[in-house]
Image (spheres, grey):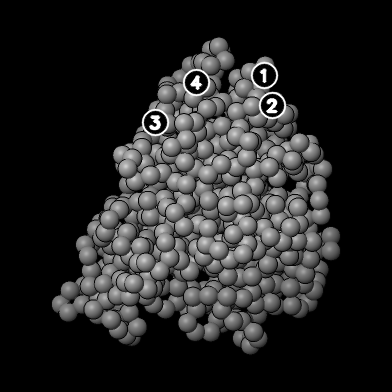
Amino acid sequence: MGAKPTQSRRSFLKGLMTAAALSPAAGRLVARPSASPPRERLSLFRYSDVQLTGGPLKAQFDRIHAYYLSVDEDRLLKAFRQRAGLNAPGEDMGGWYNPEGFAPGHCLGQIISGLSRFSEATGDAATQAKVRRLVEGFAATVGPDGFAYMNRKAANDFPAYMLDKNLIGLLDASRFAGASSAQEVVPHIMKGSIPYLPPRALEQDSHRAHSPYDESYTLPENLFYAYEATGTSEYLDLAKKYLMDDSYFDPLSRGVNAMVGRHAYSHVNALSSAARAYQDLGDPKYFQAIRNAWDMLEATQEFASGGWGPNETFVEPNQGKLGASLNTTHAHFETPCGAYAHMKLARYLLRFTAEARYGDGLERVLYNTILGAKDPKGDDHFFYYSDYHPAARKGYHGDKWPCCAGTLPEVVADYIVGTYFQSPEGIYVNLFVPSEVRWQIHGMPAKLVQTTSYPDSDSTELRLELPAAAEFALCVRIPGWLRSRAEIAVNGQAQSFPAEPRTFATLRRRWQNHDTVQLRFPFSFRTERVDAQHPDTVAVMRGPLMLVAIGPTVELPKDLVTSPNGFQPAPRPPAERPSFDARVGMEKIRFMPFYAVQEQSYSTYVTET
Ligand SMILES: [Zn+2]
């Protein structure tokens, strides 16, 4: 269960490395195995239904898309080709990815997966072509016996982890990038991988001779996906076999906190396997498990950013461990991987419940963790940990191509599918981001255009484009962080109807073409303490954003945040995000959103005095 603290830091961090998986389940593949729709109150849009049209999410989306489009295919495939005896041009990848590295070839499948999602989201032909070339290049290296690992080391050390990533790459390439040949590769790699898999989902155990850090408990999600895509019942049987019921999902379903001490990211990722189990098998135990786990995360594990798992490990609740970690580590949240798993879990729970609280959680993690990740700068190093230590600086993982290099394109592409949801009654607006979404109302094409500068501002406008008037529900998330009433107007006329925080406000009416809805969610300052044992150690929040102090350890008078002139907008060049100055005595302390921090030294938590 997680790495032991006696290890060296390097092997500890490596041992705790992780990865990802997912299945967006747009429901347009063959052989849908069971009646999943009744368990979903909301459904996802396809990546191609939604366009981001501006703002910081789109800017990051475009940068990450461009970066992964530029990753050299020969480098990615080199060691796979060498193993297969093929011509293998190109430079070594280095780091974890190399044949002798920690996890040889680990993120090829995730890069294919991420590019596939970007491909469907943008319709970009170059991205689609790259996915096809990567799939064909990878398929050419699969042995006659189906051996698809980069080498024996990968097969022995990470048999499940590697299969999980290869599966998501092939399935997403087929589903999202039109690479139909990808799905034909699946049975081959399954055949070649199964002999290396453990007999059941194993705990992580640093004392195990083989594969001590493999993540076999994350396999079911993509095995359910493989079954959904191919109809092969063997994959369904395998999915059931690797559900970690006894030590994880069963206790979680009974409200027992089985997370404590476990490797954080991979065990949040494993919750997506429980979500798929609920979706595909219908056993409410799995629904209870993920719902309870979400509550435990919020109540006992989360920093103000929504991130969790200092040193990649879940803490014991009610012991002040989060607060204590601020000064003892710089590894507070494994950001791309953790945000990927967190936002995926939030989407499953949103779909099952239509409860806005999960949208709140998705928003919190998006704006305050992954949106603040530093971009890859082309030297094969990647942002990994969010650092909440006093006087921290954002940086890159010391090793090339860590796990977070694989989840980064997936999590950022997934901004698209976290923004809007739909139900038979209408459309749900979950995120406030400049964007457009197209859908059908009774077979009629409809479009919603959202215009906003959120989170720089606290308002947004939704405009409907309809070929004819239509009655449906427009449901808008009213954020849980609101401290005063949401303001809602339709065509400029103020409306008064239920719009409680942490709910979706439902505007049901007969909508006309070009109807508009104006919303304002007044931002206010507040503090959130790190844990009950450190009541004076707080993060400063404004609306959805966590603001960090620029500079070293900071002390703030207790009432400053709520006093009318406590925080003043700071002067800024037009291209910069809004920041604020707190006046403490003769001193001014600059606060800015975590996501906007670049090279500055910053302190996430301050001391209230
Ligand atoms: Zn990672």
Residue at the outermost left position: 586
CA separation in Å, label 4 and label 3? 13 Å
- Where residue 166 appears, as percent x and y from the top left, is 60, 33
Q: Which of the 4 image quadrants contains residue 487?
A: bottom right
- Residue of label 2: 191
Do residues under tags 1 and 2 come within 8 Å of each other at their CB atoms? yes
Q: Which of label 1 and label 3 is nearer to you?
A: 1
Q: Residues within 10 Å of mark 1 (few under 14, many from 20)?
A: few
Between discs 2 and 3, the one toward the N terminus: 3
Between discs 4 and 3, the one toward the N terminus: 4
Q: Is mark 3 within 8 Å of ligand 1?
A: no
Residue at the outermost bottom position: 496
CA separation in Å, label 1 and label 3? 28 Å
Which element type, helix, strand or loop, lies under badge 2? helix
Q: Which of label 4 and label 1 is nearer to you?
A: 1
- Residue of label 3: 95
Give me the disc on residue 145.
Answer: 1
Q: Say above or below: 94 vs 402.
A: above
Residue at the outermost right position: 442
Q: Can residue 51 be seen in the rendering of this structure?
A: no
Q: Which of label 4 and label 2 is nearer to you?
A: 2
Between discs 1 and 3, the one toward the N terminus: 3
Q: Residue at x 81, y 54 (%)?
A: 35
